[in-house]
Amino acid sequence: MLSDAHAHLNDKAFDNDIMSVYEDCLNKGVGIIVNSAWDRASSEKALELAEKYDNMYFTVGIHPHNAIEAKENDLYALIELSRHNKCVAWGEVGLDYHYDFSPRDMQKGFFGDQIAIANELSLPLVLHLREAYQDANEILDKNIDKLNNGVLLHCYSGSMELARDYYNKFGCYYSFGGAITFNKNNKKSVLEVISKDRLLLETDCPYMTPVPFRGERNTPALLGLVRDRMACDLGLTAVEVENLTYQNIQRFYRLGEK
């Protein structure tokens, strides 16, 4: 069974054909989809999808891009949404210095606040980190006593040395999507140093569409292309990758408890 650890079917790109997209995912063997949120509205939409479709789960959180737009009571609203039995994590949260859509000090403040909230709620954290690892390291180190429920670096883009460091410090999980099919973003050396019980598949749809469909809208139905590349890089079969990532997503998101 294929398992998409980080999707965005709650994105407006799917407003007009979510049912057909969902059916296509089932036909392609996708059995679990976790829709990750980036603000209050996307958290609410992800909850709606989780209530409608049995194999969908969701996260809540404020993405660093959206920190500047967040209202004073949004975090309180997200805490209430997180009490739903199909909410499996807090995220995606973190730092993004590539675009700097939100001021960096504001990003760091929201990041620290949400680490504390996730800990209070006993929820895993889903992290978005881009070109900001030094500041992220400082914040994570400062809050290491609050990282007790699992940490996932979604769409991991760091080095193999950093992957080892984050695993040793925080016991992190790592999810990989369509980028591993891009020649310039080959992650074979990174995949090889990550413990197999910490690997997950993701699409980050509608973004990061894998080769040979770059330029088109991504969906979880294309997850098999990511699985195949991961299998090739690790010297495993497609079935072996499906099985280990299925076990890992169950463990990280505690799906057996839902």
Image (cartoon, rainbow, N blue to C red):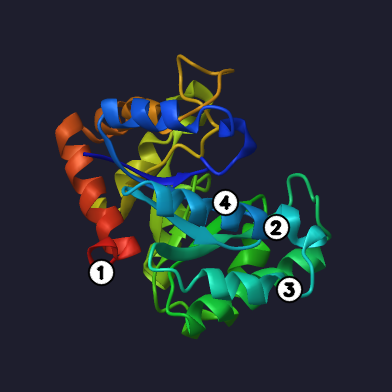
The type of residue carrying mark 3 is: Gly
Comparing labels 1 and 2, the label whose residue is closer to the camera: 1
Residue 140, position in %: x, y? 56, 73
Closer to us: 140 or 238: 238
Reading the image, the residue beneath label 2 is 64
Q: What element carries label 1?
A: helix
Q: Is mark 2 on a helix, strand or loop?
A: helix
Question: Nearer the N terminus, badge 4 or badge 3?
Answer: 4
Q: Which residue is drawn at 77% across and 45% down?
A: 99
Q: Disc 3 and disc 2: Cα gap in Å?
A: 10 Å
Give x and y (percent) for residue 27. Answer: 27, 26
Left or right position of 240 against 210: left
Amino acid, disc 1: Glu
Residue 39 in sight: no
With 178 as the anchor, is 200 left or right in this view?
left
Q: Which residue is drawn at 34% across and 62% down?
A: 253
Q: Is residue 85 above or below residue 103?
A: below
Instruction: Return the mark for residue 45.
Output: 4
Tell me whether the residue at label 4 lies in contact with that at label 3, contact meaning CB atoms closer than 8 angstroms. Answer: no
Residue type at mark 2?
A: Pro
Q: Which mark is residue 109?
A: 3
Which of the 4 quarters of the picture holds residue 13?
Answer: top right
